[in-house]
């Protein structure tokens, strides 16, 4: 009887260990996610270190921030995969775990000859969040998305920006500007999100957001970088 109980215990332990192992992302999956977060963090830091970066008051008001580092412009022109990025949401005085997104499109309005461009999006209100977390969000010219103002003391109260749910920026070859991203399509990269968290982007960034502490430690870098600029 005792031997049978021990055998059952061993089987249960092996089953639990197998289930836990199955939930862990593969080494390659995690490395790719870590590299994407690191690239996004570097892109944001470089933009904020420039003299004409994103106004701090806008960063303080943003509900969430999205970074698409090194998007390939040529891919957008031919309608292929444009780039992948990271979104994190404000949680109290900190930030959520990062969710992963994809971006495709054909119309940018920011042409400086660079083959790769960093894109930053500030999600300013609940309408902006709902749009971002939809299964497929195509940016249009209806006023919900606007080119963001630049400069340390720039105000967002100009016509077309005051009520915008999303403010957008681009940086290529050192040049930085607010841009119109009409025609760009944002979709959740839920294959990657599920590999890392077993959750969708909507579950990671919804209410309540997934806390940063629930993400692998190497994926917290973007939130840590943001916290140095957004108090």
Image (tube, rainbow, N blue to C red):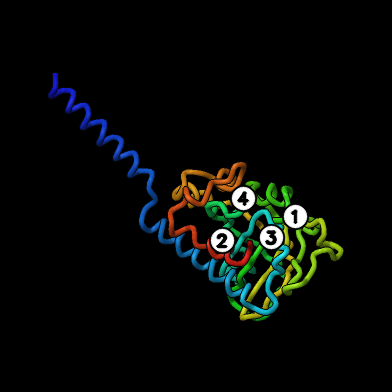
- Dot 1 or dot 2: first in sequence order is 2
Q: Are marks 1 and 2 in contact (CB under 8 Å)?
A: no
Q: Position of residue 185 (x, y in %)?
A: 66, 57
- Dot 1 or dot 3: first in sequence order is 3
Q: Quadrant of the N terminus?
A: top left
Q: Quadrant of the C terminus?
A: bottom right
Question: From this viewpoint, which residue is outermost toward the top?
Answer: 1
Cα gap from disc 1 to disc 2, whole angstroms = 19 Å
| Residue at screen point 25% across, 36% down | 14
Dot 1 corresponds to which residue? 165
Cα gap from disc 2 to disc 4, whole angstroms = 23 Å
Q: Position of residue 144 (x, y in %)?
A: 78, 55
Dot 4 corresponds to which residue? 92
Q: In this rendering, would 2 be left or right of 28?
A: left
Between 184 and 230, the one lying in front of the other is: 230
Q: Are marks 4 and 1 in contact (CB under 8 Å)?
A: no
Q: Are marks 2 and 3 in contact (CB under 8 Å)?
A: no
Residue 142 visible in this rendered orientation of the protein = no
Q: Quadrant of residue 15?
A: top left
Q: Is residue 145 above or below residue 43?
A: above
Dot 3 corresponds to which residue? 60
Q: Is residue 192 above or below residue 199?
A: below
């Amino acid at each position: 009887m005792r031997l049978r109980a021990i055998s059952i215990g061993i089987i249960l332990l092996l089953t639990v260990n197998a289930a836990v192992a199955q939930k862990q992302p593969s080494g390659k999956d995690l490395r790719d996610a870590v590299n994407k977060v690191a690239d996004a963090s570097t892109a944001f830091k470089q933009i904020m270190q420039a003299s004409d970066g994103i106004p701090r008051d806008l960063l303080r008001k943003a509900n969430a921030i999205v970074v698409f580092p090194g998007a390939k412009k040529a891919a957008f022109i031919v309608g292929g995969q444009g780039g992948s990025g990271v979104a994190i949401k404000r949680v109290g005085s900190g930030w959520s775990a990062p969710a992963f997104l994809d971006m495709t499109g054909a119309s940018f309005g920011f042409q400086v000859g660079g083959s790769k461009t960093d894109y930053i999006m500030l999600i300013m209100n609940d309408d902006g969040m709902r749009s971002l977390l939809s299964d497929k969000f195509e940016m249009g010219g209806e006023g919900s998305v606007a080119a963001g103002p630049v400069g340390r003391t720039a105000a967002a109260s100009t016509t077309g920006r005051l009520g915008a749910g999303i403010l957008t920026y681009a940086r290529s070859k050192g040049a930085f500007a607010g841009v119109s991203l009409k025609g760009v399509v944002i979709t959740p990269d839920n294959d990657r999100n599920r590999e890392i968290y077993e959750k969708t982007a909507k579950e990671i960034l919804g209410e309540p957001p997934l806390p940063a502490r629930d993400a692998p430690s190497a994926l917290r870098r973007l939130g840590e970088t943001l916290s140095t600029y957004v108090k």
